[in-house]
Structures are given as structure tokens and as C-alpha cells.
Image (spheres, grey):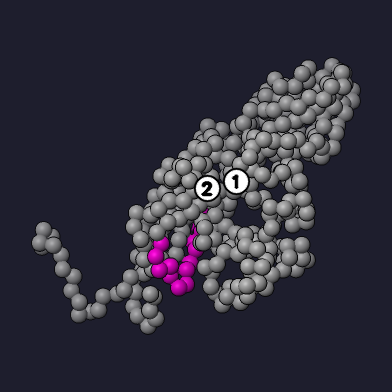
Amino acid sequence: MFQENKNYLFHRKIIAVHSQDRDINKWPKSNEFEVKLPINYKKVSSLQLLSIQLPKKYNIFSNYNQNTKLKYASGAGVDTTIQINDGTYTPQQMCAMLTNKLTDITVVYNDIDMKFYFYSDAEFTIHAGENITYSDLCNTNNVYNYTFNWGLPFYLGFEKKSYTSTVSDFTIIDSDGSLNSITGKYVIVSPVPAPVYGEEDIYLEIDKYNYIDEIEPYSINTNNNITDVSYLSCVSLATLRGERSTNYSKITQNNLKQRGVKCLNKSSNDYNGVYNSSFAKIPIFIETGKNVTHDSAFLNNIYYSDPPIETLSKLKFKFRYHDGRLVDFYNHPVSLTIGLGMLREDFDKGNTIKFPEAYS
């Protein structure tokens, strides 16, 4: 028990965490797991993320993310759905994959306007607005209902509608700087620059110790079709008094009322967000084939506990995007370095420290 009016010394401990050390039967994927700590750490006053290394195999596109399928109709008018392989793509790699999957349609990318160009000798249609079914039972959300990241067409720069090709000419600049001119073909150009590299940030949650408040995505805030994201914006008297130990991000309105919490519905004009939703916001710089590594120069994330945590014996981690989707690490390992700040009782001046005989 933390006692007031008593002297304490502050000391630190560094913990190396590896996702491989989790109970794989209980936590089969490395994007969400819990680990038991080496000892019970006492009177923990702060937690800090000192460094993190994410796997080089980082799936922006996967069946789990529901962004690997595209529906189109060839010149014969037959609708076909293709599916690209799971993985992370450069724009040029995406062009090669799509050209391989599409029948009699070539795909190129313009490095200047960052758009994909589809062309063929015959008329064709891209059904970018189709709500395509995915079979991954681990992700029950239908991402098609989102405003952003709603499927492969979004990452190719399309909106939710069908596009029919027209005969036109165009010139693009390839990645090597050379000009590539196409004339007299049936063409569809994505209307907006394509975010083929995916999200720019990953959010790390540490259960019970999140302290970052997060603005909620507008599509989640207003779209009634998304029933599994029932976040509420909450303000409690306990929070106003400085108590940060309660995570209100995913508890029901009835439970909050029982706790004396004043809640405002997420569609309110007054508040829009999640209280204590995450521990760290990690910028991602994707370079195919290399690990994503950050140290404390990027991560000044410190959770302070007042009063200190009496006993800390385990930590639970979750890696997700801003819209709530778990990151698809393809089950490759994640490693973190966590710094703990702890308090211990100060020695009275009259006390002495006895050392073993070997050190005398």
C-alpha cells in the first residue's frame, strides 16, 4: 500500500517483450497477446514504450483485411471477381499482380499523379462499388461499410461505383523516369491518388494502461450498419479527479451508468471519440523486406499511475488501425522494450546495508 508522508526512491526496470513468448494456444496471432512478467513488480508509477520492432512481413492486403478482391466485366459482359495474393505491394508490383489476374487488361501506374491506369483492346467495366463477401471468420466486421479502407478498390484509388472504359490516349512516367504512351485503347483511370501503401500509423493498446484519447472515425460515428463498434464518449467524475485506472473504451452504456459515468452518445455534436483508447501511436514507414523499427526518439509515450500500481504481473498488447481493424502481421513476431518506473521506500539514515562476505 502506498503511504503518504513517507520517502520513496524512484528506480527503473527495463523489460524485453517478444510475442513468441505468449501462450500460442490462447493467443494464436501476434497482433494481440498477453505475457506474464518475470516477477511481480511493486509500486509501478509509470510505463513507457522505449522501442518496438514490427515484422518485415506486414500484410497491407489480405483476406483478413477484406481488400484482396476486385469485380470487373470483360468485353463479353461477363462479371468476374479476381483475388490478389496476400502481402504488401509497391505500385509496380500491384500493376504486375492485377495484370496477371485480369483477362486481356493491362494495368500501369503513373508516378506523377499516383493513379492506376487500366487499358484494353475491348470495352470493360470495373465494379468498384460491389460489396464483395470474404470468408475470414476471425474478422466479423464488414469493412465495406467504412468510409475509408473499405476494400481493394479503395486502395487502387476508386470510389464506390462502377466505371466503364472509354477510348482515349494517355502518357505516364514509369518509376525509372521513362515515358510510356498508350493510344487508341479502352481506358479506366482511378479518380484519386491510390493509397497503395496502406495506413501510416499503427495504434498499440496495453490493457488497463491506455491513456491516449482518440477521435473516432466519422464512418463509425454515424454509420448504423457497423454494430460491433459501440464506442461512447464518456466523462466521469473519477476521471476529473485524476484517476486514470479505468478504461472506458468498450463498456456498455448501462455499465457506465452503474459506475456513475456521464455518457454522451457517439453521434452527439458535443463529443466524438474514445477515452483512453490506446497507449501509443506508431508511425509506419513501409520498405518491403525490412523490419519496421522505432526507438524512443519517436516514442515519447509514458503512462503515469497515481497512486502507483501496487502489483504488476502481466501485460496484454493489441496492435490495430485507427478504424479498429487488427494489424495483419501474418503471425510473424513483434518485439517491444518496456520501461517501468517504480517506487521503493527510502532507507532511514540510521540503517546500514549489509553485503555478503564475498563482497567485503
Q: Are marks 1 and 2 in contact (CB under 8 Å)?
A: yes
Looking at the rendered structure, the secondary structure element under dot 1 is loop
Q: Residue 167 sits in which quadrant? A: top right
| Neighbour tally class for label 1: few under 14, some 14-19, many 20 plus, Cα within 10 Å | some
The quarter of the image holding the N terminus is bottom left
In this orientation, which residue lies closer to the viewer: 262 or 279?
262
Magenta span: chief secondary structure: strand
Side of 277 relative to 83 (left or right): left
Q: Identify the amino acid type marked 1.
A: Leu
Q: Residue 100 sits in which quadrant? A: top right
Q: Where's residue 344, x and y in %?
A: 33, 70
Q: Mark 2 points at which residue?
A: 32
Q: Where's residue 160, x and y in %?
A: 82, 40
The quarter of the image holding the C terminus is bottom left
In this orientation, which residue lies closer to the viewer: 223 or 57?
223
Q: Identify the amino acid type marked 2.
A: Glu
Q: Can residue 294 be seen in this view?
A: no
Q: Residue at x 74, y 57 (%)?
A: 221
Q: Residue 108 sits in which quadrant? A: top right
Q: Where's residue 297, x and y in %?
A: 49, 53
Q: Where's residue 43, x and y in %?
A: 38, 68
Picture disc at residue 203: none
In this orientation, which residue lies closer to the viewer: 131 or 252?
252
Region rendered in magenta: 297-312
In the image, farthest residue toward the bottom? 5
Q: How far apart are marks 1 and 2 (CA)?
A: 8 Å
Q: Which residue is drawn at 82% across and 37% down?
A: 129
Q: Name the residue under label 1.
A: 326
